[in-house]
Image (cartoon, rainbow, N blue to C red):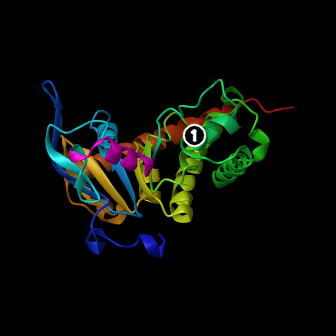
Amino acid sequence: MSAAREGGPGAGAPLFELRGVSKAFGTQVIFRDVNLRIDAGQTLTLIGESGCGKTLLLKMLVGLIEPDEGEVRFRGRPIAQMDDAELLDLRSHAGYVFQSDALFDSLPVRENVAYGLVEHTDLDEEAVTARVIECLRHVGLSERILDAYPVDLSGGMRRRVSLARTIALGPEVIIYDEPMAGLDPQNITRIGRLIERLSDELGTTSILATHEIVTAFAISDRIAMFDGGTVAYTGTPDEMRAHPAPAVHAFIDEALRVVDELAALAAEAESNAPVPR
């Protein structure tokens, strides 16, 4: 953890804040009086079982969904009170990495990464290409793939191209919605390390929703665990390991059991793979 990211919740006003947020769809209650702060320059990871509302919360942060009760604030300003220009400004500060890489299959890598630059800046073609190459290098990819199409890339490479597109406009906040979903263990580790490195190099605030508990422990400044519609825990990874609540330990133990099972299956598959001649 870098010195710039060591400030805790008392270090200043939060970048985002949820105050008494409740949300339901019909009889299905997702959130019940949720309070959470997200500080600038830190990596906050949201964990919890499928359907607990992690993706919903990410959408609330950029004003795509409003709570039924309570409020979501950006720099102290309630998002529900923002006009269209203010919402556009908020979203211009936030880059969103989707669970699927959401690349345009009909466009080569250079045009995928350049999409936001072409739409939202006045950069000429040479400057756009230079920025695309810079962003690809940030995510560990070479300019040699500029003319490749998404179908030509592995799943891990597609995810990194998606991330290059996200950082092209220099967002202050990067929101990751299950960025490791569907990847093999090696790429899960690679993407986790990349998120951590980008947070340090670019000074971004990172907000991550994931099932990958090992990654959450490795890269997070703070973790927020959702259970039963509320925040069951929020704090550092070390504090989470020492937390006395049975629900917290049950979630950690089950997540780590699944990680061990997947690792064992991967090792078995590798050992049974034919030896190349």
On the image, which quarter does residue 16 sit in?
Answer: bottom left
List x then y, in percent, for residue 109.
68, 36
Residue at the spot 66% in from the left edge and 30% down from the top edge: 150
Residue at the spot 65% in from the left edge and 39% down from the top edge: 157
Residue 66 lies within the magenta run: no
On the image, which quarter does residue 23 sit in?
Answer: top left
In the picture, the quarter occupied by the C terminus is top right
List x then y, in percent, for residue 11.
30, 73
Residue nearer the viewer, 76 or 277 = 76
Q: Is residue 156 visible?
A: no
Residue at the spot 54% in from the left edge and 43% down from the top edge: 120
List x then y, in percent, for residue 48.
30, 43
Helix, strand or loop for disc 1: helix
How packed is label 1: few (under 14 Cα within 10 Å), some, or many (20 or more)? many
Name the residue carrying label 1: 162
Residue nearer the viewer, 230 or 96 = 96
Q: Give the extent of the magenta segment.
A: 81-94
Residue 89 lies within the magenta run: yes
Residue at the spot 35% in from the left edge and 65% down from the top edge: 238
On the image, which quarter does residue 211 sit in?
Answer: top left
- Amino acid under label 1? Ser
Q: Main secondary structure of the magenta part?
A: helix
What residue occupies the far right of the structure in this picture?
A: 277
